[in-house]
Amino acid sequence: MPLSLPQHFCVILSAAIPAAAFLLGWTLRPAVPTISPAVRTTASAAVTRGMAVEKMAGAPGKIEAAGAPTEVPRTGPAGRIAALLDHAATLDIRGTLAALRTLDLQPGADGGLALQIFLARYGELDPQTALTYIDTLPGSERTLSAATVMSAWAARDPQTAAAHLEEETGGFGLDPAAAALAARVVTAAWAADNPAAAAVWVQNLEDDSLRAEAVPALAISLAIEDPSTATAWVNSLTGEDHSSAAGAVAAQWAQSSPQQAAAWARSLSGDSALAAVEGVVLWWMLADPAAASQWVNTLASEVVRDTAIVALTDSPAIRNDAASAAAWANAIHDSTLRDSTLVSAVERWRLQQPEIFHRR
């Protein structure tokens, strides 16, 4: 069924800054496994700038985000966002434009996050005009804003939104960063309503840059609903599509069933195996570092094991234990990869425990 305003806003938020979902205490449906540093920085700033929007809050109400608590108190970041979502849902086009202009006149207010909420509403009501409004925004805000409008559009009319995305990518339309994020959120919004139709669109995409973003986005959406359906879809793909989808499915699956995801990753070969193993290790290390480490030691292929070790040393559990990271890095078979990983580990170790490296 089509996404509501809170739901597709959550798609945008979790696509751009997955960490924000945890900060807000919500279980959001991620749209992509990774996001460009520029977009992550822009969206993170929106969350942390202060969010002075309490005056828009009304009585306690409900939020429809997937996995969110039924009642959200009007305190803290989650409460303020809930209040904004409730308020935005009541606005017509004139009211939405008035709200956007009010943000322009309130330096220091929660310009970033409130902007995206009101743009999401604008995108529901008149997406094409909303996209032209984005041209008036500072350059640093346009990428996330375009994706917000495209997500709202796709929630209501995915076919038209997808066609517009293809038409506007490149040339004088969406810039590469905006098109990339828009491809992810359009795919996620369409898959939430009709995964089969979304899959047909993704597999028929002719633009390589859009396809590179849409394939893993759809893979994650499918894996959230049913990993067996997702793996079957991955098996229908070839080449780079297969490897990127495999990595996305494995990473998503590992969040709920790391052992099953690991077994599937082990069954793959080539670049797909490397991508899937990396995704499994990164997420498994967050939940159970000991089990993940033991599994890495069972990998027979040197190439696959090296990839797994690099992912392991990049996990928070090992990054904060630089001595262990150095020991793991030293076990990498490929000498070039071993040296670069070891240098990074030792440098982190030196910064964490400078007294060990201090020459008396």
Image: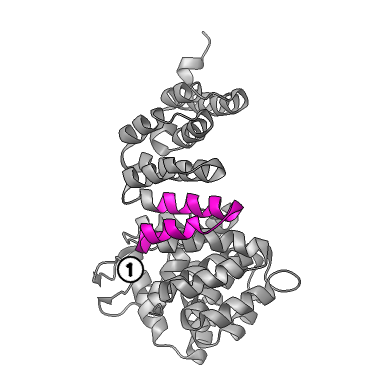
* Residue nearest the observer in this picture, 115 or 249: 249
**Magenta stretch: dominant SS?**
helix
User: For the residue marked with disc 1, what is the amino acid?
Assistant: Ala
Q: Residue at x 57, y 60 (%)?
A: 213
In front here: 154 or 302?
Answer: 302
Instruction: Give residue 7's quadrant in the image.
Output: bottom left
What's the coloring here?
Answer: one colour
Q: Residue at x 54, y 57 (%)?
A: 237
Q: Position of residue 49 (x, y in %)?
A: 47, 61
Residue 30 visible in rendering? no
Residue in the foreground of this view, choosing between 238 and 100: 238
- What residue do we see at 33% from left, 77% from top? 57
- Magenta part of the chain: 223-252
Is 229 one of the magenta-colored residues? Answer: yes
Location of the N terminus by quadrant is bottom left
Q: Position of residue 75 (x, y in %)?
A: 29, 67
User: Residue 17 placed where, x, y %?
Assistant: 47, 58
Residue at image mark 1? 66
